[in-house]
């Protein structure tokens, strides 16, 4: 039976992988996937704590996060498609004109 | 009823100021004159009321409204009529009415709109002057004080198209500002000291103080008030504006710059007689400044060639006499001289106005002469004025000037008395110089009719000279009668009179007597002294006239030779001791240089603009640096986000 610490460690590893993916990968879709990994890492923490403390709050929040993540994925993908149509590229470095 | 006195001229002002453009000359002049006459009638009624007051009661007062109430400070808009202000309102409305009547003829060649503007200013002036003399506290007085200054400015610059007139107006305004600043400081100091600005309350408080106790703050306060008076009443060192004020229309010179406004300083000190009496140091300064001004201006008047400037310096000189009287504690004598002076000096100014009018704007006495036969009314009335101011026995100026000189002697100031006598001699000489140069001898008018522009309008008279038209002649004759008669209200006891005006005015200064101030007591010893003093000043007056007869009637060449012999002195006098030039170098130039080089080019252009532009440049410069952070690269943003989170979390973890 894994302890709370093991869950948190796994969550931290997943979160680090997601963060590294967001920072390093050069494909917008991959970046979105990495963001999803980060979200799920957080979800894992919530659930782990929920079980440890014997409260339902953690699970409830996770459902919320999943809902928001689904919405975010829809909006995010739509933006990515729009951007792709605009520049024929998925590399975020292509989109540097959003500044003063 | 009291409120009506200043209100009537104010209504006249409003009518002429708003509807003036549409009114004909006779209507706007009529409205203004009627307002003044109405105010005069009310003043006479009020005067009679004061005369009939029971002995214990000093004054009638009327509070129009609560004006300013802030904490302990309380200023009510109160008018207060006591003997002193009763005399003043009679002078202001009486002489004012005559001058309004005179002006209807004198200004007749102005366009109707200008004519209405003139009369609106004149009425406004009268309203403010009446507020000044009726105000029962310093603040109400100050309203009038500033108001008359404003009207003086407007009227001096009435012919504003002429640069010299505009400049003279500004000069009068600015010089007066210097005095007014001191005046306000003095009033503030008095409020701090007494907690009130009501004249009679201050007098009551001050009356309890001994001169030793009053030394210090109160001395400073009275000195500041006196500086205010030197501005308004044209005394050293702030007299320079009055001669230039002659750029205004002549009736204005008569009303504002001879009879009424310039006496405001004298009135103000007389009004605070009790207060000034407990600060003998200030009074000493007042006396010395007064007599110095009297003498100084008298010498300048001796050689000036502009008829109105001679009269202007004469006014400065006579005001000096009044301050001398105030300075030796003879407040009654000062107000008496103010009263008589208002008549004969207004007469002289109006007479000179008639001459100028007849000559089509000529003001230089060197181009006059021989007008005696052409302008008989003007000649005789002017002569009466000259006789009155010179101090010939029986005329108004004699009684008042004599009383001042006697009081000076009685107070033990021999030196001041001697200078006063000398000034009396000068007065007689320069006045009769004027009479002889203008009215006697051969005509020296240039052949082509001497058409000079005294502002607008007076051109076109050409050679057809006419004596004063009826309205002007009326004012001249009434004032001439006044110049003969008004002296008799104050014939001294020593001369077998009752000194009615002195007795009448005394309650206004009376707390001073209780405080053991310098009000001179008249006893029999003093009466003998007064007779001697009178005899001497009579001799002086006649010798002055004699000198003038010799130099300016019999032996014109002697005058010229004298001027040549003392060429240096003559030039100094002709240039008015270079006072204007000295002020220019000592004050105006430095101020201009400091303003331009220092305040403008350094402080404003570099410090102020520098600070403002500096703030802008700083923000801009900083932004130029910070804009590099915003790359537009999403991954860079994400990295900094991460970095921030790590830093914050790190801080909380390892704190």
Image: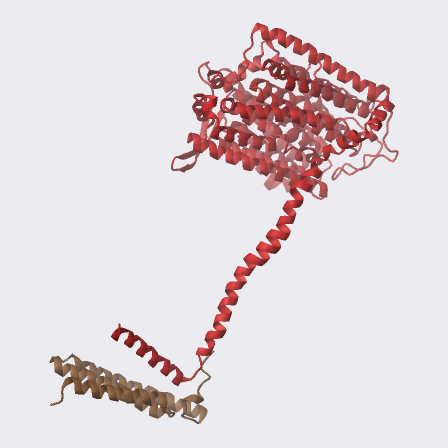
| Residue extending farthest front | B654
| Residue extending farthest bottom | A88
User: Residue B438: horizontal and vertical position, in percent?
Assistant: 80, 25
Q: Front-most of B601 and A73?
A: B601
User: Residue A2: horizontal and vertical position, in percent?
Assistant: 13, 89
User: Residue B557: horizontal and vertical position, in percent?
Assistant: 87, 24
Residue A88 vertical placement versus B279 (above, below): below
The reply to whether residue B471 is visible in this rendering is: no
Residue B41, image quadrant: top right
Classify residue B172 as left or right of residue B506. right
Chain the render paints red: B
Classify residue B432 as left or right of residue B409. right
Colour chain A appears in: brown
For the C terminus of chain B, the quadrant is bottom left
Classify residue A21 as left or right of residue B370. left
Q: Front-most of B573 and B449?
A: B573
Residue B89 vertical placement versus A12 (above, below): above
Residue B400, image quadrant: top right
User: Residue B223: horizontal and vertical position, in percent?
Assistant: 54, 30
Residue B587, image quadrant: top right
Residue A12 vertical placement versus B626 (above, below): below
């Amino acid at each position: 039976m894994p302890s709370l610490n093991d869950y948190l460690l796994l969550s931290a590893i997943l979160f680090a992988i997601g963060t590294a993916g967001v920072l390093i990968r050069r494909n917008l879709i991959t970046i979105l996937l990495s963001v999803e990994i980060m979200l799920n890492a957080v979800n894992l923490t919530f659930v782990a704590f929920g079980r440890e403390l014997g409260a339902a709050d953690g699970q409830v929040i996770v459902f919320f996060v999943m809902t928001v993540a689904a919405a975010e994925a829809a909006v995010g993908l739509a933006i990515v498609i729009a951007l792709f149509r605009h520049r024929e590229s998925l590399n975020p470095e292509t989109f540097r004109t959003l500044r003063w | 009823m009291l409120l009506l006195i200043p209100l009537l001229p104010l209504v006249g002002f409003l009518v002429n100021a708003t509807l003036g453009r549409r009114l004909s000359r006779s209507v706007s002049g009529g409205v203004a004159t009627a307002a003044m006459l109405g105010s005069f009638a009310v003043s006479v009624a009020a005067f009679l009321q004061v005369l009939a007051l029971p002995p214990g009661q000093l004054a009638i007062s009327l509070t129009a409204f609560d004006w300013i109430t802030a904490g302990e400070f309380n200023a009510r808009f109160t008018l207060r009529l006591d003997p002193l202000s009763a005399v003043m309102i009679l002078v202001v409305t009486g002489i004012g009415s005559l001058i309004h009547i005179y002006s209807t003829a004198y200004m007749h060649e102005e366009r109707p709109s200008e004519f209405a503007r003139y009369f609106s200013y004149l009425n406004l002036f009268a309203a403010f002057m009446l507020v000044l003399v009726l105000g029962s506290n310093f603040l109400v007085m100050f309203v009038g004080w500033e108001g008359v200054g404003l009207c003086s400015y407007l009227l001096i610059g009435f012919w504003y198209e002429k640069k010299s007139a505009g400049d003279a107006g500004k000069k009068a305004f600015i010089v007066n500002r210097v005095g007014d600043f001191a005046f306000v400081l003095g009033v503030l100091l008095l409020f701090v000291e007494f907690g009130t600005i009501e004249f009679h309350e201050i007098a009551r408080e001050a009356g309890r103080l001994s001169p030793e106790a009053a030394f210090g703050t109160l001395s400073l306060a009275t000195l500041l008030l006196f500086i205010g008076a030197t501005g308004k009443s044209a005394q050293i060192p702030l007299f320079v504006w009055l001669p230039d004020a002659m750029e205004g229309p002549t009736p204005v010179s008569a009303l504002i710059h001879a009879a009424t406004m310039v006496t405001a300083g004298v009135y103000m000190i007389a009004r605070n007689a009790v207060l000034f009496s407990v600060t003998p140091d200030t009074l000493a300064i007042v006396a010395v400044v007064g007599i110095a001004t009297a003498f100084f201006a008298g010498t300048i008047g001796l050689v000036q060639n502009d008829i109105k400037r001679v009269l202007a310096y004469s006014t400065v000189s006579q005001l000096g006499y009044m301050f001398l009287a105030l300075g030796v504690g003879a407040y009654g004598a000062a107000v008496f001289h103010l009263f008589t002076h208002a008549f004969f000096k207004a007469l002289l100014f109006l007479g000179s106005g008639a001459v100028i009018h007849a000559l089509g704007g000529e003001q230089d006495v060197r181009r006059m002469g021989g007008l005696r036969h052409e302008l008989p009314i003007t000649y005789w009335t002017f002569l009466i004025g000259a006789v009155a101011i010179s101090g010939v026995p029986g005329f108004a100026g004699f009684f008042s000037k004599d009383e001042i000189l006697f009081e000076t002697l009685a107070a033990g100031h021999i030196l001041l008395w001697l200078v006063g006598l000398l000034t009396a001699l000068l007065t007689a000489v320069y006045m009769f110089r004027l009479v002889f140069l203008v009215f006697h001898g051969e005509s020296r008018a240039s052949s082509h009719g001497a058409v000079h522009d005294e502002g607008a309008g007076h051109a076109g008279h050409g050679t057809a000279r006419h004596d004063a038209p009826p309205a002007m002649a009326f004012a001249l004759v009434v004032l001439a009668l006044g110049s003969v008669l008004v002296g008799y209200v104050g014939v001294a006891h020593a001369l077998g009179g009752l000194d009615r005006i002195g007795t009448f005015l005394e309650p206004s200064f009376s707390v001073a007597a209780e405080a053991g101030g310098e009000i001179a007591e008249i006893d029999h010893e003093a009466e003998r002294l007064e007779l001697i003093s009178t005899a001497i000043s009579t001799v002086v007056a006649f010798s002055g006239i004699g000198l003038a007869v010799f130099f300016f009637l019999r032996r014109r060449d002697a005058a010229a030779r004298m001027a040549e012999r003392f060429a240096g002195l003559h030039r100094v006098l002709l240039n008015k001791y270079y006072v204007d030039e000295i002020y220019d170098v000592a004050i105006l130039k430095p101020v201009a240089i400091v303003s331009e080089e220092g305040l403008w080019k350094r402080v404003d252009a570099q410090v102020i603009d520098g600070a403002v532009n500096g703030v802008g440049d700083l923000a801009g410069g900083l932004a130029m640096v910070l804009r590099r952070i915003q790359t537009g690269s999403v991954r860079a943003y994400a990295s900094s986000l991460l970095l921030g989170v790590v830093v914050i979390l790190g801080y909380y973890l390892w704190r």
